[in-house]
Amino acid sequence: MSRRRLLGTAGAAGATGLALGAVGGAGAYAASRPAPATALTSVGTDSVPFHGAHQPGITTPLHARGHLIAFDLAPGAGRKEAAALLRRWSATARTLMAGEPAGGGAAEGTRSKETGPDGTRPDEAGPDGGHDTGIALDAGPSSLTVTFGFGRTFFDRTGLAARRPAALDPLPAFSSDHLDAKRSNGDLWIQIGSNDALVAFHALRALQKDAGAAARVRWQMNGFNRTPGATPHPMTSRNLMGQIDGTGNPKPSEPDFDRRIFVPATPAAGTPSWMAGGSYAVVRRIRMLLDDWEKLTLTKQEQVIGRRKSDGAPLTGGTETTDPDLDRLGPDGKPVIPGNAHARISTPEANGGAAMLRRPFSFHDGIGPDGTPDAGLLFVCWQADPLKGFVPVQRKLDRGDALSAFIRHEASGLFAVPGGAREGEYVGQRLLES
């Protein structure tokens, strides 16, 4: 059965997703509460549109599987090659997100359904003459999203330095940083998310092949979250420390959500017009020192975070969504939520209202050379300006967050993510063809 026929007969899709969150580096909060739980049998039928005011994968509910990958343009490749690459990538992303086989960047509406002598369709041929790998031919789109961004060095290598946003200035150094330069930054960045691991890998493989000779992989990171439908009803996810992680993210229903997360249609001074509707992604690989964390008593873990582990409620009582009472004192005269608790330090109220949309993945890459788990968080946060979002919060966390003793920032990147592509347009076209 073809993927298209499967989508036509599988039945209506339920709402999917989980609340979002992150820990270490900028707090632990959620983007939005999804509607009813998704039955596992309908996960594959859900699709996300490629075109729109914003790129997919920013406000999309948290995915069960994800890949983050950065590329550097090949020596000698410039603006022309970058434009051709983004055109190929956009066509492939649009096709795969619709639940169709990878077709080597064929233009929308031109995909042939005729089969050749060998039984393959012309639209299955890749840019290198190959065919769709078939990894996901029997699956639906599974909420697949593909998001593209540009790193600071991209503008130098394409002769577009004059159009580089001021917000792409390098992030400051933090005392908790132990950054590996080989796994940081990059000319181009792609975020892939799906609720099926094979669908996500299929997209990763297709986009890597599309890069051809124009760009080469700088680094790749693989992550996961809870699968939609795995719990009786939608619940905020837990991170690898076991903490409910994602309670107070800015929510799309809030009146100032767009102002905090997206560049306005008429950008302010220092922000070029091609970034209208876009956002900035800070990407951090944060290793959790799980062996040390798990030695703590439950009470001590809750004091480090400032919330109950069982249900995510603040130590001052209530439910997960109850505002913490930061002024409440215990019988000993000390704050119930310790002064260095992660929840206290990271709250927007303690950071001049600084806010970002956190949309992370957990990772586990085996056991490190020291015998401890190489596991933690692929932290991704979105904001209209990283100097007003990520940076002030991280600076404050860097000065006294109790959680800092149990995490290590090992890689970092900052990327300008342009607005969504219009019909007939590829991502980044307003930059590369202006």
Image: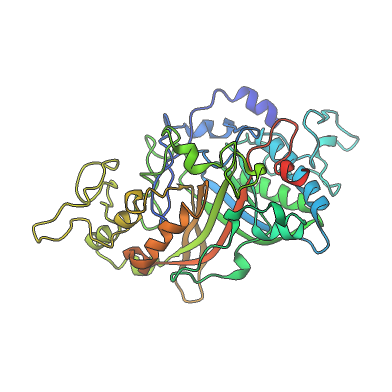
Residue 25, visible in the rendered structure:
no
Q: Residue furthest front?
A: 269
Horizontal arrangement in the rendering, residue 351 relative to residue 225 (left or right): left
Position of the N terminus, as image quadrant, is top right
Across and down, in percent, residue 3 comes to 68, 32
Horizontal arrangement in the rendering, residue 161 relative to residue 303 (left or right): right
Residue 125, visible in the rendered structure:
yes
Q: Residue furthest right?
A: 117
Across and down, in percent, residue 323 comes to 26, 43
- In this figure, which colouring scheme has been used for the structure? rainbow
| Residue toward you, 325 or 385 | 385
Across and down, in percent, residue 55 comes to 61, 39
* Residue under the point 51% across and 45% down: 64
Across and down, in percent, residue 321 comes to 29, 40
- The answer to whether 279 is drawn above or below residue 293 in the figure is above
Position of the C terminus, as image quadrant, is top right
* Residue under the point 71% across and 30% down: 423
Q: In the rendered picture of this protein, how many numbered marks are placed on residues?
A: 0
* Residue under the point 81% across and 47% down: 84
Q: Residue furthest bottom?
A: 370
| Residue toward you, 379 or 381 | 381
- The answer to whether 427 is drawn above or below residue 75 in the figure is above
